[in-house]
Image (tube, rainbow, N blue to C red):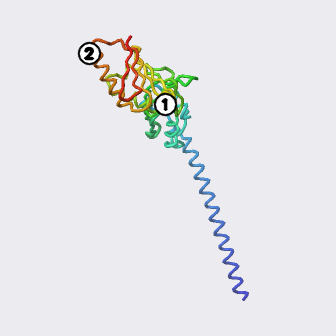
């Protein structure tokens, strides 16, 4: 009995010794790994020496690097490229972004900026908006139609954007460049104004049919020499009212 107890005690001591040796070895290995990684990420060979930015039109390199929180001497080994790309996409003007490394010391940032479709005034400030309905701010306002009476998620805003996209395709005999303003009214619907001062009241819905009617009436009026048109009322689908100057 004593002999069995003695053997069991020896086995326990050996097991404890093995566990202690394993823990010690693991600790030494972890220390070496952490120390080695720390030395590696501070090694000048992997520090960023050049950042190439592709696709920026309005954003400057300084603005992009500030938004990405990149600074001189940062190691490529410390960067999480997917998170950096997501951070860049969170910038309202950026639609798409991809970031890659060119080892050992170069970073390549590729991006696609949003293209302004129109200006939007929401009673507080002037914004730009793209064809997906994303609002963003740019320093210099391009020569674009302005959408008034709008706020985020306001009624008829999506329809106004769709109309502008169709005007870009030169539908209905009116070009995108001829549109100066689109006004939204929650009760009356959509009214747009051309650069020559014509007011076109579309009202609510059936815009395709109404603008086809507009195309026909404008073509006819131009053929008979009546070009000074002050107002066109297309509120009713099958009726067109024209007021001449």
Q: Nearer the viewer, residue 164 or 60?
A: 164
Is disc 2 surrounded by few (<14), some (14 to 19) or many (20+) residues within 10 Å? few
Q: Could you tell me if residue 60 is visible in this image?
A: no
In the picture, measured across the screen, residue 234 lies left or right of residue 154, that is left
Is 49 located above or below residue 180 in the figure?
A: below
Residue 201 can be seen, yes or no = yes
Q: Position of residue 83 (x, y in %)?
A: 52, 42
Please count the marks in the image: 2
Residue 136 location in percent, x, y?
A: 51, 29
Residue at 36 percent of width and 25 percent of height: 239
The percent coordinates of residue 11 (x first, y second) are 66, 77
Give the vertical position of 56 relative to 97 (above or below): above
Residue that numbered label 2 is attached to: 223
Q: Are marks 2 and 1 in contact (CB under 8 Å)?
A: no
Q: N-terminal of the two: label 2 or label 1? A: 1
Question: Separation of disc 2 and disc 1 at Cα?
Answer: 44 Å
What label sits on residue 93 in the rendered view?
Answer: 1
Could you tell me which secondary element the residue under label 1 belongs to? loop
């Amino acid at each position: 009995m004593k002999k069995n107890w003695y053997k069991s005690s020896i086995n326990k001591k050996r097991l404890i010794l093995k566990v202690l040796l394993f823990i010690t070895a693991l600790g030494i290995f972890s220390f070496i790994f952490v120390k080695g990684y720390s030395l590696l990420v501070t090694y000048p060979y992997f520090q960023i020496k050049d950042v190439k930015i592709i696709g920026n039109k309005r954003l400057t390199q300084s603005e992009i690097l500030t938004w990405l929180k990149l600074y001189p001497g940062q190691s490529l080994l410390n960067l999480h490229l997917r998170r950096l790309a997501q951070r860049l996409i969170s910038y309202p003007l950026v639609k798409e972004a991809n970031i890659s490394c060119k080892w050992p010391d170069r970073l390549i940032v590729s991006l696609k900026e949003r293209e302004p479709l129109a200006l939007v005034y929401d009673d507080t400030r002037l914004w730009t908006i793209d064809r997906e309905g994303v609002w963003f701010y740019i320093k210099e306002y391009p020569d674009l139609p302005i959408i008034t009476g709008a706020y985020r998620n306001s009624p008829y805003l999506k329809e106004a954007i769709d109309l502008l996209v169709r005007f870009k395709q030169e539908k209905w005999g009116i070009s995108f460049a001829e549109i100066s303003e689109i006004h939204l009214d929650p009760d009356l619907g959509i009214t747009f104004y051309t650069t020559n001062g014509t007011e076109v009241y579309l009202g609510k819905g059936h815009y395709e049919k109404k603008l086809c009617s507009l195309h026909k009436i404008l073509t006819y009026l131009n053929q008979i020499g009546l070009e000074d048109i002050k107002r066109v009322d297309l509120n009713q689908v099958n009726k067109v009212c024209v007021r001449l100057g």
